């Protein structure tokens, strides 16, 4: 099931191959991120969760169905205070990078049998761009993986 999803994602998004994954420009189809937010210059619009468009928090909030908001969770470095933390990746979890200025978050699409995982992210290089990448321990590996606490 996951392999079929992988093919669909990579075929559906026009990409340019790079040494560590695939990238797409912000005006291309972005796996659930609203087109109007993706096409506007970075930081020009606010998303439904209150984040500036094309920021990593905005992208991950969109992937979560806008359940993560600026008012409740704040910026990426604070996200560990609002979620369940793990060192083991899981599909639909958040790759949390708390080891760089301003922090960073990405969405875990799936985990491969060898422990590597496929992530989607926005603004990794501070340019508002979108990236799909296979990460392994030692190669762009996050501080941890976050899951949203269940509501209710």
Image: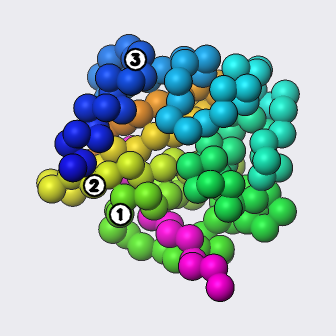
Measured in 3D between alpha carbons, the distance from the residue under mark 3 to the one under mark 2, in whole angstroms, is 21 Å
Q: Which residue is mark 2?
A: 111
Q: Are marks 2 and 1 in contact (CB under 8 Å)?
A: yes
Q: Position of residue 90 (x, y in %)?
A: 35, 63
Q: Are marks 3 and 2 in contact (CB under 8 Å)?
A: no
Q: Answer yes or no: is residue 99 visible.
A: no
Q: Which residue is mark 1?
A: 90
Q: Main secondary structure of the magenta part?
A: loop
Q: Position of residue 60 (x, y in %)?
A: 59, 49
Q: Which residues are magenta?
A: 137-152
Query: Tag 2: Cα neighbours inside 10 Å, few (<14), some, or many (≥20)?
Result: some
Name the element at disc 3.
loop
Q: Earlier in the sequence, mark 1 or mark 3?
A: 3
Residue 139 is covered by the magenta coloring: yes
Name the element at disc 2.
strand
Q: Earlier in the sequence, mark 2 or mark 1?
A: 1
Residue 46 is covered by the magenta coloring: no
Q: Which residue is mark 3?
A: 15
Q: Residue at x 37, y 69 (%)?
A: 87
Q: How many marks?
A: 3
Q: Residue at x 57, y 79 (%)?
A: 150
Disc number for residue 41: none
């Amino acid at each position: 099931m996951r392999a079929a999803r992988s093919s669909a994602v990579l075929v559906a998004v026009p990409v340019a191959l790079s040494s560590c994954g695939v990238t797409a420009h912000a005006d291309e189809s972005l796996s659930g991120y609203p087109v109007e937010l993706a096409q506007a210059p970075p930081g020009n619009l606010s998303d439904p969760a209150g984040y500036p468009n094309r920021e990593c928090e905005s992208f991950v909030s969109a992937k979560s169905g806008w359940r993560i908001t600026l008012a409740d969770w704040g910026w990426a470095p604070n996200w560990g205070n609002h979620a369940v933390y793990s060192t083991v990746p899981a599909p639909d979890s958040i790759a949390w990078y708390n080891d760089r200025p301003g922090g960073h978050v990405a969405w875990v699409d799936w985990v491969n049998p060898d422990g590597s995982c496929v992530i989607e992210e926005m603004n990794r290089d501070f340019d508002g761009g979108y990236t799909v990448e296979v990460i392994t321990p030692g190669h762009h590996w996050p501080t941890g993986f976050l899951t949203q606490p269940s509501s209710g």
